[in-house]
Amino acid sequence: MSLKEQLRAYARLLVGTGCALKPGQELQLTAPVEAAPFARMVAEEAWAAGAGDVTVEWDDQFTGRLRYLNAPMSAFESVPEWKRALLNGAAQRGAAFLFLEGDDPDGMAGIDPARFTAWTRASHRDCKSFYDGMDLGRNVWCIGGVATPAWAKKVFPGVGEEEAVEKLWAAILSTARADGADPAQDWADHSDTFQRRIKLLNDKAFDALRYTDPNGTDFTVGMNPGHIWAGGGAATVDGTWFFPNMPTEEIFTSPHRDRAEGIVHSALPLNYQGGMIEDFWIRFENGRAVDCGAKVGLDRLQSILDTDEGGRHLGEVALVPHASPIAQSGILFYSTLYDENAACHLALGKGFPECVTGGLEMDEKALAEHHINISATHVDFMIGTATLSITGIAADGSETPIFRNGNWVGEFA
């Protein structure tokens, strides 16, 4: 297929498989202005699928940066009424949310991280229906990448802009399994490959996982009683199967918020709020991050931890083999959407209700009582390398190898 035909197939995939859009359902689309031609293609596919309405919220990183540089701090401490109405109203009406990501990884460099932290807190407080809709399985949502010049030049710095954009589109389409003859079937098949390992992990019901790596990682994280491993897609409370991330290569769960001990070292740079955090480490005691360091972006790392108390605890552990297609591509995307699917990772902040038995029926108080972390943030950071070992520890102390040399081993292979 030509690139235009592949992009059309990708737009159709995001709408029909990623968001599982139903006839009559609204689609709320967020897209960078640089990706307007593709966003219009997505809108066409949504209308063709029978959407009840399609609303596009354009994101311009350049003017967003101007706001962060010039607006008073009070501008980030509450969400404007129009945005509350837009997001909360759409969630309450059962809309599907599709987020197209293509920001410049360095586009917010030099901004005071306290401003991002304030906006994160305000957004989760003032747009509660929106966030609850996604977190509690009431709304479908999907994040997909779009090639933009600034992002492409960051990923492929040695070529001209046009060639860089073409190379980035090729990488996006390949990792999203959107370049084959039948992308929807490819995703159904991909989803099926997760199920055997998910069942094994759930049957094992490990009490803890221990991570070791010659790079200095020496870390043990405890599991929740009744924890559930998931991956390859998600289901809403009404049973709609959708894909929150395209691509996805991870199997994940939420750990016990107060059972993390030791130190973890990053495996890849982390792009957070338009700036980089590189070569960093975090040390945990009793589940809480008590110390950290970074060669680049320490203030940004500290701002994540300072979002709220939950920002210092873990909400996710995710298993991704070093043999994953994204890791083997050798491309550093400088985007969590892609780089988290190249390596095992952890996440600071909010845990997943669907990762504990009965969690989707619980409120925040009940989730906290079941040791699921509560926070206004959720930030994935990559710790998987070609030398990482992960061992499952049962309640009786017996041990089962899960990863060796960065990949599944034994019965998990």
Image (cartoon, rainbow, N blue to C red):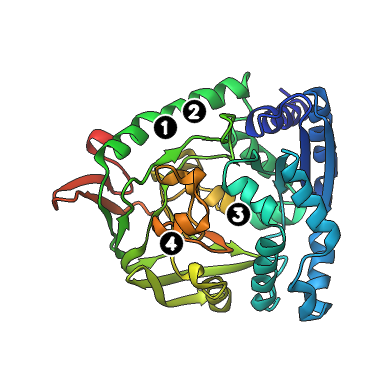
Pointers 1 and 2 in contact (C-beta within 8 Å): yes
Q: Earlier in the sequence, mark 3 or mark 1?
A: 1
Residue 261 occupies quadrant: bottom left
- Quadrant of image for the C terminus: top left
Amino acid at the residue labelled 1: Phe
* Label 3 sits on residue: 335
| Residue 395 pos. (x, y %) | 18, 51
* Label 2 sits on residue: 190
Question: Which mark lies nearer to you, 2 or 3?
Answer: 2
Mark-to-mark CA distance, 2 and 4? 28 Å
Looking at the picture, tell me which residue is in the foreground, 158 or 306.
306
* Label 1 sits on residue: 194
For the point 68% across and 27% down, the residue is: 16
Q: Considering only vertical position in the picture, is 104 above or below 282?
A: above
* Label 4 sits on residue: 314
Residue 334 occupies quadrant: bottom right
- Callout 2 secondary element: helix
The answer to whether residue 200 is seen in the rendering is: yes
